[in-house]
Image (tube, rainbow, N blue to C red):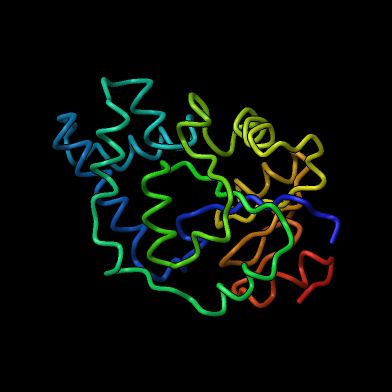
Amino acid sequence: MRFTTIFFDLDDTLYPPSSGLWPTLKGRINRYMVERLGIREEEVPLLRERYFRKYGTTLRGLQANHEVDMADYLAYVHDVNLTDYIHPDPVQQVVLAGLPTHNVIFTNADINHVRRVLKVLQIEQYFSQVVDVNVMDPYCKPSVEAFGLALKAAGESDPSRCVMIDDLPHTTRAAREFGFYALLYGTAPDHDSAHGAFTDWRELPRLLNGNKP
């Protein structure tokens, strides 16, 4: 394997999209905008879409256009019982344990959410570093600046020795353009969005060694 560092997205990547957790978190983002910021409920969907496209995340859009306390926002959004949605995956644990790489969580969430998710999934020991929204501040995935900060934080100088695993095609496309080997989790890649894709964690070692599953 030619890779030395793997950057893993968190939500809908280290647990399956079918868990229902991410839709729950999105619902809490909507509630925050209504309850904390006084935005009319019917305006929230279009506003979130606009912020997501322009800034990369709803949070960055809210920070740019509203008075938002980031710590309060993140605490509110992530205030859910994770065990209602996600559970340890023994297959994933075996695959992660066998990786010889420096494994980094690279997420637009914050480190508190990361720690809670990893604890529930029982995979904390397989990750030595977290690049979260605070490390990237004021940027976020999929911006070039965020990838640059992640690379620096991981102590890497050569993006071609790095892998990005994410569930969003626009993030894997950005990673690929930055020079990473990009893998899409949970769905097939569209056009040039990734070098490969997988839905079964057992496929990952073969992809990392340049073999299509």
Query: In this orientation, which residue lies closer to the viewer: 46 or 208?
Result: 208
Report the quarter where the C terminus lies: bottom right
Q: Tell me where residue 203 sits by quadrant.
A: bottom right
Query: In this orientation, which residue lies closer to the viewer: 52 or 5?
Result: 5
Q: Position of residue 38 (x, y in %)?
A: 15, 30
Q: Is residue 182 above or below residue 145?
A: below
Q: Tell me where residue 166 sits by quadrant.
A: bottom right
Q: Is residue 111 above or below residue 121?
A: above
Residue that appears at 69% across and 36% down: 151
Residue that appears at 29% across and 49% down: 78
Number of labelled discs? Answer: 0
From the viewer's perspective, is 79 left or right of 122? left
Query: In this orientation, which residue lies closer to the viewer: 103 or 60?
Result: 103
From the viewer's perspective, is 80 left or right of 133? left
From the viewer's perspective, is 151 left or right of 84? right
Q: Tell me where residue 72 sits by quadrant.
A: top left
Residue that appears at 75% across and 46% down: 180
Q: Position of residue 182 (x, y in %)?
A: 71, 53
Q: Is residue 125 above or below residue 139?
A: below
Q: Position of residue 122 (x, y in %)?
A: 45, 67
Q: Is residue 185 above or below residue 34?
A: below
Q: Position of residue 208 (x, y in %)?
A: 77, 64
Residue that appears at 66% across and 39% down: 154
